[in-house]
Amino acid sequence: MAIAAKSVFLFVLAGLAEIGGGYFVWQYWRNDAFWGIGALGAVALIFYGIIPTYQPAHFGRVYAAYGGWFVVLSIFWGWAVDRIEPDRYDLIGGAICIVGVAVIMYWPR
C-alpha cells in the first residue's frame, strides 16, 4: 500500500506542477500578468517533467495513467481557482478516469 500511496502523491504533485505552471503561463501570456508569474509557471512546468520520473512503473504506463489524473485535477482546479463548479457529467467522467488509472497502474499483473 505504501507504494500506491507514494504513486498517488507523485501524480497529484505532478498535476499541480503542470496545471499550476500552465495557469501561470496563461495568466502572463493571455491576461498581461507580471512576467515573473510566467517565469514561475515555466519553472513549475520543468518540475512537472521531473516529478513523474520517481514513479515505480515505466514511462508509457505512468503517462497513460497520468492522463486520468490530469483530467480529475483540472476539474478540481477549475472549481477551486476559477470557481467553475463541476456538474454531474464532469464528476462521472472524472470517476471513470480514476478507475482507468487504477487499472493501468495498480491492477495486479
Image (spheres, helix red, strand yellow):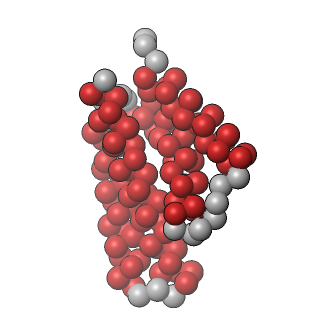
Q: Which residue shows up at 67% across the image and 48% down it?
A: 90
* Camera-side residue of 88 and 2: 88
Say if 73 sits above or below 5 in the image: below
- Count the numbered circles shown: 0
Position in image of residue 19 (x %, y %): 47, 60
Position in image of residue 38 (x %, y %): 41, 77
* Camera-side residue of 82 and 14: 82
Say if 91 sits above or below 99 in the image: below
Q: Which residue shows up at 44% across the image and 26% down it?
A: 105
Question: Is residue 71 rendered to the left or right of residue 13?
Answer: right
Is there any visible trace of residue 60 in the rendered image? no
Is there any visible trace of residue 37 in the rendered image? yes
Position in image of residue 14 (x %, y %): 38, 50
Question: Is residue 92 rendered to the left or right of residue 76?
Answer: right
Position of the C terminus, as image quadrant, is top left
Q: Which residue shows up at 35% across the image and 63% down it?
A: 44
Say if 18 sits above or below 22 in the image: above
- Residue found farthest to the top: 109
Q: Which residue shows up at 43% across the image and 13% down it?
A: 108
Position in image of residue 91 (x %, y %): 64, 45
Position of the N terminus, as image quadrant, is top left
* Camera-side residue of 37 and 77: 77
Question: Is residue 87 rendered to the left or right of residue 70?
Answer: right
